[in-house]
Image (spheres, helix red, strand yellow):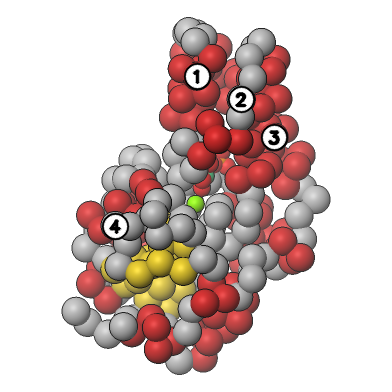
Amino acid sequence: MLPVKACIFDLDGVIVDTAKYHYLAWRRLANELGFDFSEEDNERLKGVSRMDSLNILLEIGGVQLDEARKEELAKKKNEWYVELIAHMDDKEILAGTTQFLTELQKVGVKIALGSASKNAKTILKRIGLMEMFDVIIDGTDISKAKPDPEVFLLGAEALKVEPSACVVFEDAVSGVEAALSAGMRVVGVGSKETLYKANDVVSSLAEMTLDRLEK
Ligand code: BG6
Ligand code: MG
């Protein structure tokens, strides 16, 4: 394995806890369609693209719709989500994030974002972290959702770093799988039980150090 030259971060669930806003918007949609949507159900949507998330939601509610109607509902959900994230600020950056990014910058490790979200740039701007990233790959750049490795491979390519010198930070099982398929090492952010495929697991970036990264 090469020494670490780049770190690629997922956004939702790693840098900010936006799962709660996605949940509120999806639950509002479910309720409008006449069924309930629990926080447990919401776990299934982590790391999953907007359209795939809608399909899971409709499956939970036992609702079948044509593609045009699905597009309409995904748009509606996103409008509610955008309203919710419009109030975000730097207080929502998860513990340890700014400090770890600063340490990486100091030692010259490149930093990329690898997110499935089409709202990633809006969120980074709101929380004031846009400038910390050398490269941003988000839902507007990719054609294949995680667990496909595309998002992370595009990140490594843009940084001009070989995949084996990259470490990915991910909170979703699909994201851990995507990183491993890209030939990268991966640190899971969350629980060991869920993210057992990752090379290492931390409960938040506050547990990360440069030493731990090299191990
Ligand atoms: C991922 C989230 O980062 O982005 C998913 O974990 C979300 O929950 C996906 O569905 C797509 O996000 P957006 O903002 O493009 O709807
Ligand atoms: Mg995530």
Q: Position of residue 123 (x, y in %)?
A: 65, 55
Query: Given the image, on which type of amino acid does mark 2 rest?
Result: Phe
Quickly name the residue at label 1: 60
Mark 1 or mark 2: which comes first in sequence? Answer: 2
Disc 4 from disc 1: Cα separation:
27 Å
Q: Residues within 10 Å of mark 3 (few under 14, many from 20)?
A: some
> Residue 8: image x %, image y %?
42, 67
Q: Between residues 44 and 84, which one lies in front from this camera angle?
A: 44
In percent of width and height, residue 180 lies at: 25, 58
Reading the image, the residue beneath label 4 is 197
Mark with earlier residue (3, 2): 3
- Where is residue 38? Give x, y as percent: 61, 29
Q: Badges 1 and 2: C-beta atoms under 8 Å apart?
A: yes
95 relative to 12, above or below = below
Q: Which residue is mark 3?
A: 24
Q: Quadrant of the C terminus?
A: bottom left
Amino acid type, mark 3: Leu
